[in-house]
Amino acid sequence: MAARWERVRQTVRDASRQVGRSAAAAGRVGARAGRAGARAGRGTGRATTRAALGAVSGTQRVGRAARRLTHAQGAGRTGLGQLIELTAAHSAGDALVTAALAGTLFKLPVNEARGQVALYLLITMIPFVVVAPFVGPVLDRFRSGRRFVMAGTLFGRGLLCFAMAAAIVPSDVFTIFPAALAVLVLSKAYSVSRAAIMPSVLPADIALVTANARVALFALVTAGIAVPVGAGVSAWLGAEWVLRGATVLFLLQGVLAIRLPRHVDSPDLEELAEGDEERPHRWRTMLNVGPVVAEAMWANVAIRLYSGFLLFYLLFLVQDRNLPGLPPAVAIGVLAVAAGVGGLAGTAVASWVRNHSPQVIVLATLAVTSTVTVLAAVVFQLWSAVAVALVAAFAQGLGKLALDAIVQREIGEEVRSSTFGVVEAFLQISWVLGGLVGLLLSLFAGGSAGLALMTVVLAGSLGWLLVRRRRRVREVDARVEAARGPASSPSGPRPAGGGERFSRDGVSAEWVRPRSAGTATTVVRHEDAPTEKRTRPLTSPHG
């Protein structure tokens, strides 16, 4: 009996020792796993820290590179660099608002009926009807405070985005719709103000077309980055959070607008020197913009009409499967990419043509568009439609930048904002009319017929503008020769006023009187002493 109990105790002791050894082994394995986990955690933490530091360093390098580009060629000294950065941030804010509202009231009605699309087109014209008669003259009246006007448009959009963010979840249409239209009006008011102040911040080494192209290029890049970011955040967190982010961005931009250089809203020096002279009536000056601006504006009107036509005409041709070659969704995507590439190419080319006249650039874009449209009408298929979409976007971007440069150069400070407002209204109205024509023709006309009609419109506009330009140039040449004729003869009579001044494509043509000694000449203006009183510097002396 005692022997059996001894064996039981020995068995229990052996089992206990075995369990203890197993527990100790398990503890050692757990400790090793814990040490391995700690090492992995430290490695992950170090990798995350390195990735974060790399992202911060990369962002800083990109920021420094962007700052070097925006402030190149004296742009940082005159304030152009700050204006480029402000406009780029403004474009990013507009892109965020577009991405947030893309799935609500303001989505492109691809699959809608033509009547609803026509209503959409008419709605998009409302803000421009407001900009032309009201916003432009108000901006001209307060041109001595343009920084604060621009800041006011940005602060206003920030508050409107906050209101729309609160109305997104309950789907308050009566808040979203008016607020979105007001955001669009304020966006156009900012664009008009920005274009009007461009000559005030222009460095001597940069042409107006190049400066406008630089602004547009950075705006396109930031918008292209902001749209997918806004779309992703909208799908993840909701459109209201995108609008809240846009609110913060617009409010920060308002502060940056106030920090623009002070000479942006300084009174014009020539106006201070000649403040006692009688000025022409504001509305008459705004409407009578001169032949150079009028020709450039009508060329852009024709191009914008063609762009609106192509957008809706090709859209419904693809939707109705009258443009075979690819599935409808893929074909629409290819056309959209072609239009985006064309717009970016037009902006890039504009920065390389500083030695060419803006008038020539505008007419050249219209000529290229007409030529490509003729070829596409002859051989109409999907890829020719892609080509005309690319060229139309290219011509629209390049022609608009050249038109802005012409208005900035030719129009006086006192009505420049009003003129930009009228130009924007005309261009938008022509785009809407082109879209309506495209809707109608897509009902019963094939691709070749529609492009043939637009070929007639474009070629007719180009021919009319060329004839008008040639007639005007001949008249100016004849007047200049008539004014120089008597002065070329030693015994001939001189004009009573001492000289005469004409305008040819924005360049002054003046009667020149030789001096009595030496080879230098003196420019003599009508009823003016031969002084340098009216000479204006290319850049503001405050820069």
Image: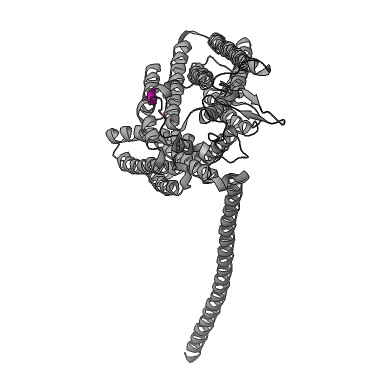
Q: Nearer the viewer, residue 222 or 413?
A: 413
Q: Is residue 365 magenta?
A: no
Q: Nearer the viewer, residue 227 or 328?
A: 227
Where, by quadrant of the figure, is residue 282 drawn?
Answer: top left
The relative height of residue 70 versus residue 118 in the rendered view (above or below) is: below
Residue 541 drawn at (x, y percent): 53, 44
Visual colour scheme: one colour
Residue 487 located left or right of residue 176: right
Q: Nearer the viewer, residue 297 or 508?
A: 508
The relative height of residue 542 versus residue 381 in the rendered view (above or below) is: below
Residue shown at the point (59%, 52%) measured from the top left: 64
Residue 248 located left or right of residue 12: left
Residue 438 drawn at (x, y percent): 47, 15
**Extreme residue toward the bottom, this view:** 2
Residue 443 drawn at (x, y percent): 45, 10
Residue 42 located left or right of residue 112: right
Q: Please provide the residue range marked out in magenta.
A: 275-283
Q: Nearer the viewer, residue 198 or 441?
A: 198
User: Count of labels shown?
Assistant: 0
Confirm whether residue 65 shows in the render: yes
Residue 254 drawn at (x, y percent): 41, 46
The relative height of residue 278 versus residue 53 in the rendered view (above or below) is: above
Confirm whether residue 390 shows in the render: no
Q: Is residue 280 magenta?
A: yes
The relative height of residue 476 versus residue 169 in the rendered view (above or below) is: above
**Extreme residue toward the right, this view:** 519
Magenta segment, prevailing SS (helix, strand or loop): loop
